[in-house]
Image: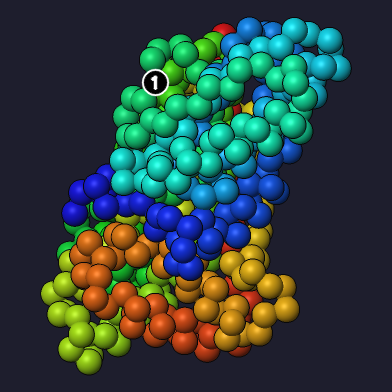
Amino acid sequence: MEVAEVLHMNGGVGDLSYATNSRLQSKVISMTMPIAEEAIVNLYCSTFPTTLTIADLGCSSGPNALMPVSQLLEAVEKARRKLRKEPIEYQVLLNDLPGNDFNTIFKSLPSFLERLKMKIGADLGPCLVTGVPGSFYGRLFPSHSVHFIHSSYSLHWLSKVPEGLEENKRNIFMAETSPESVLRAYYDQFQKDFSLFLKCRAQELVGGGCMIFTLPGRKSQNPASRECSSTWELLAVALNDMVSTGKIEVEKLESFNIPKYKPTPTEIEIEVAKEGSFVVDGIRVWDVSSNQFSNNALDGFKSSSDNVAKGIRAIAEPILASHFGDQIMDELFIKYGEIIADRKAKEKPSLVNVTVSLTKPK
């Protein structure tokens, strides 16, 4: 399975789309945006560029794709006016893998730019938006061309499924029953990918440029702990149930693993120090309730669990369908929602998020 070819969120704006089922991701962007706003304002006030280039990596589609850009531009414009500086040009680079639904973003651009101008004022400088399809585990932009990089809920995805997972029987991710070799394989792949990511971004950022990213992480030293694996462990239960009823071949299940990794803050710091291109300005750990998937704070267990299942389906359906086929997706996620409902009655899981602020020295 070539991850870059099949990894993308559900497109469009329908009931099962990422645009409709990304409330959690929106909440995380809102929680972490003050850190990004402070960083980009400090960058602007220390350099006063006439053109400010901002990249958002793993932008996906729907309202979240343009939400960070809007808030970052507003923060810079507020500082610019306070200092009575001339309007500047903005270049916005929206990146995701080629399978991303860029068309939905592009269709929303005219109304987005109009709202932005109404909110900020007539003296808002040109805002030029470009889509950049490609993997961020490689070069995306010209050398020394980007001032500020933002990414939210993207860097936990790996460039490929780690090698050496043959013994991860009946699991689709790291789990309590996974052998030590599986945990090591995932960590090794994270190290390779994250180091390459840092190297590429260091080449693209200007001296003094900043990068802020948030990704799902963990506090436990065990990468197979419940805080990391529960989502995929329950999906594995649903898949195993379908194996037992003959809907999925066991060989299909045992040849599938999710290409993602939730690092600890320390693991991130180690890789940043080893790669050597950046200074760590700060690392913050956040807990977010998994109920943020719900669109209604008063939802009961059943409706809330349906929303969680839809949220995971919006994220994982393309990669699951590429391996197991489209025809089982409805039944799989109905079963998954039922399993979540049973588990949520017993547990109140939270999601650990890690926000990292880096600067490339001048």
- Percent x, y of residue 210: 58, 23
**Up/down of 71 relative to 205, above or below:** below
Snapshot quadrant of residue 171 = bottom left
Residue 47 pos. (x, y %): 67, 8
**Which picture quadrant has residue 281?**
top right
Judged left or right of residue 254, residue 93 is: right
Quarter of the image with the C terminus in it: top right
- Is 182 positioned to the left or the right of 228 in the image? left
Furthest residue toward bottom: 245
Q: In the image, what residue type sits under mark 1? A: Phe
Q: Which residue appears at 67% of the width and 80% of the height?
A: 299
Q: What number of labels is visible?
A: 1
Disc 1 crowd rating (10 Å Cα; few below 14, some 14-19, many 20+) is some
Q: Is residue 271 among the parts visible in the rendering?
A: no
Q: Nearer the viewer, residue 250 or 68?
A: 68
Where is mark 1, residue-wise?
A: 141
**Quadrant of residue 219 in the image?**
bottom right
Frontmost residue, 77 versus 221:
77
Q: Is residue 330 visible?
A: yes
Left or right of 106, for residue 295: right
Residue at x-position 27% and y-position 52% = 6
Residue at point 32%, 29% (across, down):
138
Residue 178 coordinates in the image, percent (x, y):
31, 69
Residue at image x 48%, y 58%? 13
From the top left corner, tell me how far across and down residue 265 is, in percent. Answer: 56, 45
Q: Could you say whether the residue bearing mark 1 is in a helix, strand or loop?
A: loop
Q: Quadrant of the N terminus?
A: bottom left
